[in-house]
Image (cartoon, helix red, strand yellow):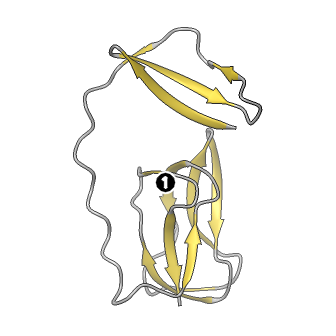
Amino acid sequence: MKSYTITVNGTVYDVTVEENGAVSAPSAAPRRAAAPPAAPAAKPAAAAGAGSVKIEAGAAGKVFKIETSVGATVKRGDTLLILEIMKMETPVVATEDGTVASINVNVGDMIEAGALLATLN
């Protein structure tokens, strides 16, 4: 199931599309379009060279909280950051022991499934 925000003639609709193609609108009333989005925030600087182990998003969502920092030593299963996916806080964990080489997102960023979130060495 994927959620989308669609703007039609200045009116914003939140819709959810299921795998079988059915569409549902969670709210009956449309909401007003917000001001145009500001320029994207600069990405945090990566450490000298990104790591060889890529940590990618399993689903689209919003970066809710970053739990670690570049240079931190992590163990497999440690939480690196938390995504808000469909109104639920979902931890993103280290897939193996290592050192955080880069964090490629900021709190508040909207990300797509498969987006590079961080790297480890």
Q: Which residue is drawn at 57% across and 58% down?
A: 82
> Pointer 1: residues within 10 angstroms few (<14), some, or many (20+)?
many
- The amino acid type found where label 1 is placed reads Val
Judge left or right: residue 55 versus residue 45. Answer: right
Judge left or right: residue 91 versus residue 11. Answer: right
Foreground residue among 23 and 121: 23
In this view, which residue lies farthest toward the left? 39
In this figure, what is the number of numbered marks? 1
Query: Is the residue 38 above or below the residue 29 in the image?
Result: below
Spot occupied by residue 108 in the image (x, y as percentages of width and height): 41, 50
Query: Is the residue 104 above or below the residue 8 in the image?
Result: below
In this view, which residue lies farthest toward the right? 20
Judge left or right: residue 104 versus residue 21. Answer: left
Q: Residue at x 58, y 61 (%)?
A: 57
In this view, which residue lies farthest toward the front? 21
Spot occupied by residue 63 in the image (x, y as percentages of width and height): 49, 54
Spot occupied by residue 91 in the image (x, y as percentages of width and height): 64, 60
Q: Which residue is drawn at 52% across and 8% down?
A: 29
Judge left or right: residue 46 versus residue 118. Answer: left
Q: In which quarter of the image is the N terminus?
A: top right
SS category of the residue bearing label 1:
strand
Quadrant housing residue 25: top right
Q: Residue at x 64, y 58 (%)?
A: 58
Quadrant housing residue 20: top right
Spot occupied by residue 121 in the image (x, y as percentages of width and height): 53, 91
Judging by the rendered image, the residue that carries numbered circle 1 is 63
Foreground residue among 18 and 35: 18
